Image (cartoon, grey):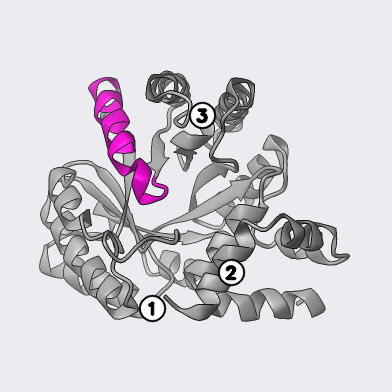
Amino acid sequence: MNPLRSLILAAAGNDAVRRAVATAPLSRGVVRRFVAGETVASAVDVTGDLVEHGLRVTLDYLGEDTTDREVAERTVQAYLSLLDQLHDTGLAVDAEVSVKLSAVGQALDERLALDNASRICAAAEQGGTTVTLDMEDHTTTDSTLRVLTELHRSWPSTGAVLQAYLRRTSDDCKALSGSRVRLCKGAYAEPASVAFTDPHEVDLNYVRCANILLAGSGYPMFATHDPRLVEIVAERARWHDKSPEHFEYQLLYGIRPTEQALLAAEGHVVRVYVPFGEQWYGYLMRRLAERPANVAFFLRSLVSRS
């Protein structure tokens, strides 16, 4: 693993570093470039602005690894409020939500996570939009896919996220190639026994998985900021005779916004992954670890308002 990536991931679990970042004078301004505020209202405002500029959105209420039922319930209520506001503002047609099962009780009880995710899926359906289940570290993959299978019984549009750095992912892509699937590289620290550790191997597996998804009958969603992979996906989509409305690119809020606009202007469907909420620190650290080049942007942001 890249030493810088290892360092960043270690910092993600360090309370002293978290406090230092959270209390630094300029940190809040920097975080706002990557996180759409701490409230549902701020997230809806950001969503409206992105949609106005021709982009679609998926919203993530930050938080994970919940071991308290009350905290899990607060997360569900935040999503229900968000979905209500997306519907009321007319944004639901262009905005969906992304949900981490660990934030709604997965560590406590898989059934609890299923019940809570079902409440969110029901509200999304009533509001005219959809849900995508975020994927977390490899120890939760089987549980998350079991929950997804159950959700598909009532809400077949529920999306899945698969991570190209896991060795198992090509098989998972085959199993889910008729569904909505977001393919990303992956941003958790994983052992070599279950994950590719060479970035080139991860990229090769991303392309293998992209081909599987594009050959299927589902709706692939390609989450990457890598210009090479963006071009490869476009070429493979043409080869598989997939027109732009039959797949989409997904990019993170605050990362390469110019590229987001250019892709949309070229006729591609582009969805921006927009996180919000008070629990922003772990998310920010994983984004830096996922693409260590983002560290330079983050550091420049500390001394620049541009």
Give x and y (percent) for residue 7: 58, 72
Side of 109 where 63 appears, left or right = right
In the image, 5 versus 133, the foreground residue is 5
Q: CA distance from mark 3 to mark 1?
A: 34 Å
> What's the amino acid at mark 2?
Ile
- The structure residue drawn at horizontal position 28% and vertical position 55%, both measured from the top left corner, is 247
Of the residues under marks 2 and 1, which one precedes in the sequence? 2
User: Relative to residue 265, is residue 214 depicted above or below?
Assistant: above
The residue indicated by pointer 1 is 227
| Type of amino acid under label 1 | Pro
Q: Residue at x 51, y 29 (%)?
A: 104
The percent position of residue 266, horizontal first and vertical second, equals 38, 70
Q: Circle 2 is placed at which residue position?
A: 8
For marks 2 and 3, give the one nearer the viewer: 2
Q: Which residues are magenta?
A: 135-154
Q: Is residue 175 left or right of residue 180?
A: left
- Residue at the (22%, 68%) spot, across then down: 205
Q: Which of the numbered marks, if any, corresponds to residue 104?
A: 3
